[in-house]
């Protein structure tokens, strides 16, 4: 029993030293004295954001003047052809219809259109109120002069 306790202490001491020696980024060893575990075949990992951005970088490039607003592009993973439309609301190539009134229309364009309507109507109301106040002041001044 004493031998096993001494053996466990020795093993714990080796693990402690191994952790102190280990540089950041190195994998932890499973047992003292053993080789560090190495992961093989990292195919399960997601592609890095940088690599993903490289693949889809073309989506942010607007069409030139006179160019079509729709194009066919082969998907990088599936290899299938997909249709993309230039959406002015998103300033990107998207798969939805950029027309806000269409069935599969751009929601962002709809929201922008609704916001413009609300701001225009509230602006007209406040302008009308201001004009009414100016007219009333003018009429009051004219009555006071008479």
Image (spheres, helix red, strand yellow):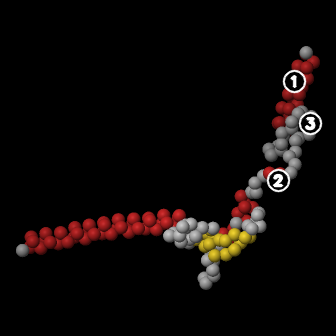
Q: Residues within 10 Å of mark 2 (few under 14, many from 20)?
A: few
Pointer 3 residue: 34
Name the image quarter holding the C terminus. Answer: bottom left
What residue appears at the point 14 percent right and 72 percent down from the top-left corner? 139
Q: Which mark is residue 9?
A: 1
Are discs 3 and 1 less than 8 Å apart at CB?
no
Q: Nearer the viewer, residue 32 or 76?
A: 76
* Number of marks in the rendered image: 3
Pointer 2 residue: 43
Q: Residues within 10 Å of mark 3 (few under 14, many from 20)?
A: few
Q: In the rendering, at what x and y percent does residue 83 appear? A: 67, 71
**Can residue 42 be seen in this snapshot?**
yes
Which quadrant would residue 31 be assigned to in this image?
A: top right
Helix, strand or loop at label 2? It is helix
**Can residue 89 be seen in this snapshot?**
no
Q: Which mark is residue 109?
A: none
Q: Is residue 132 left or right of residue 72?
A: left
What residue appears at the point 54 percent right and 67 percent down from the top-left corner? 103
Q: Nearer the viewer, residue 4 or 123?
A: 123
Q: Earlier in the sequence, mark 3 or mark 1?
A: 1
Where 20 sits versus 46, above or below? above
What residue appears at the point 41 percent right and 68 percent down from the top-left corner? 117
């Amino acid at each position: 029993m004493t031998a096993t306790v001494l053996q466990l202490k020795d093993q714990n001491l080796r693990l402690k030293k191994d952790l102190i020696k280990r540089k950041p980024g190195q994998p932890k060893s499973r047992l003292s004295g053993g080789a560090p575990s190495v992961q093989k075949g990292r195919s399960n990992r997601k592609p890095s954001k940088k690599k993903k951005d490289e693949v889809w970088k073309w989506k942010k490039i607007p069409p030139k003047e006179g160019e079509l607003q729709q194009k066919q592009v082969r998907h990088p993973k599936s290899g299938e052809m997909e249709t993309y439309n230039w959406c002015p609301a998103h300033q990107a190539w998207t798969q939805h219809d950029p027309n806000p009134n269409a069935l599969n229309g751009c929601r962002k364009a709809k929201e922008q259109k609704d916001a413009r309507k609300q701001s225009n109507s509230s602006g007209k109301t406040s302008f009308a109120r201001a004009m009414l106040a100016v007219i009333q002041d003018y009429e009051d001044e004219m009555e006071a002069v008479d």
